[in-house]
Image (spheres, helix red, strand yellow):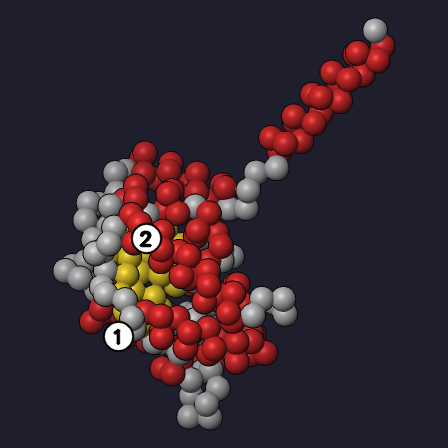
């Protein structure tokens, strides 16, 4: 009898442990759902998905007046995370255009080569095309963050690979912000970044605004 009781205690703890292991960014996705419950998102909007460069662009709609934008960036995310949460991020909004900024976090370690980021983008793109074959898709190039200077070569390789892939696809465009964020010395301009040398300030977003605007659909 004692052994049976111990077994049920172990089983209960095991189940509790499984429940506690929620996937990364689960709370972010639930927060998006709560925002949607509180206020219905606009229909036929431009959907921004990706990592913290979008998350911190909280006033993105102010940069693009006249455009309906849904910002669903969640900080720290990788292309793998966009793939994992695809059904929660894209089909539910039925966007008229999808703008992606992601891949920088994928490359921010020594274990992930540029080819992996390219492959992950292709997987994400395949999911998007499985959902909608004609919705315009725009990928913003991985940016040159000063704090991640050691990964610039990988970032440029990933950008080149993704650009080449996009060039063979319809209704898909590559938005290159990388060169515009460099100074005359060929290095990232410190003045457009926050003190962490990773995230942008208003100056950085103003650069993005000018480059991205011509790609947005009315």
The span from disc 2 to disc 1 (Cα, nearest Å) is: 26 Å
Question: For the point 35% across and 61% down, which residue is it?
Answer: 100
- 154 or 35: nearer the viewer: 154
Residue lying at the far bottom of the rendered structure? 185
Residue 198, percent across and down?
51, 70
Q: Considering the numbered disc 1 on the image, is that residue within a helix, a strand or a loop?
A: helix
Question: For the point 36% across and 46% down, which residue is it?
Answer: 89
Q: Is residue 197 visible?
A: no
Q: Considering the numbered disc 2 on the image, is that residue within a helix, a strand or a loop?
A: helix
- Which quadrant would the C terminus be assigned to in this image? bottom left
Looking at the image, residue 59 lies above or below residue 90: below
Q: Residues within 10 Å of mark 1 (few under 14, many from 20)?
A: few
Specify the label residue 210 is tagged with.
1
Question: Residue 166 lies in what quarter of the image?
Answer: bottom left
Specify the label residue 40 is tagged with.
none
Q: Horizontally, is 127 left or right of 135 in the view? A: right
Specify the label residue 128 is tagged with.
2
Q: Are marks 2 and 1 in contact (CB under 8 Å)?
A: no
Q: Is residue 24 visible?
A: yes
Question: For the point 31% across and 35% down, which residue is it?
Answer: 38
Question: For the point 32% across and 56% down, which residue is it?
Answer: 48
Q: How many marks can you see?
A: 2
Question: Residue 16 lies in what quarter of the image?
Answer: top right
- 101 or 157: nearer the viewer: 157
Question: Residue 3 lies in what quarter of the image?
Answer: top right
Mark 2 / mark 1, whichever is N-terminal = 2
Looking at the image, residue 39 lies above or below residue 140: above
Residue lying at the far top of the rendered structure? 1
Looking at the image, residue 179 lies above or below residue 127: below
């Amino acid at each position: 009898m004692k052994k049976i009781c111990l077994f049920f205690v172990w089983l209960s703890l095991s189940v509790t442990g499984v429940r506690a292991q929620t996937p990364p960014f689960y709370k972010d996705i639930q927060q998006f759902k709560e925002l949607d419950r509180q206020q219905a998102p606009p229909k036929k909007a431009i959907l921004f998905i990706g990592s913290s460069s979008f998350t911190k662009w909280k006033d993105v709609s102010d940069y693009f007046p006249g455009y309906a934008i849904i910002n669903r960036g969640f900080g720290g995310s990788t292309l793998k995370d966009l793939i994992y949460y695809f059904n929660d991020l894209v089909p539910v909004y039925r966007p008229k255009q999808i703008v992606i900024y992601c891949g920088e976090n994928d490359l921010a370690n020594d274990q992930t080569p540029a080819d992996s980021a390219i492959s992950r983008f292709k997987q994400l793109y395949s999911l998007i095309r499985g959902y909608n074959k004609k919705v315009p898709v725009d990928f913003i190039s991985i940016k040159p963050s000063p704090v991640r200077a050691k990964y610039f070569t990988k970032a440029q390789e990933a950008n080149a690979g993704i650009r080449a892939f996009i060039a063979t696809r319809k209704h898909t465009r590559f938005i290159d912000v990388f060169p515009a964020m460099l100074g005359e010395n060929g290095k990232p301009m410190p003045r457009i970044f926050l003190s962490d040398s990773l995230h942008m300030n208003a100056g950085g977003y103003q650069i993005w605004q000018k480059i991205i605007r011509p790609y947005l659909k009315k």
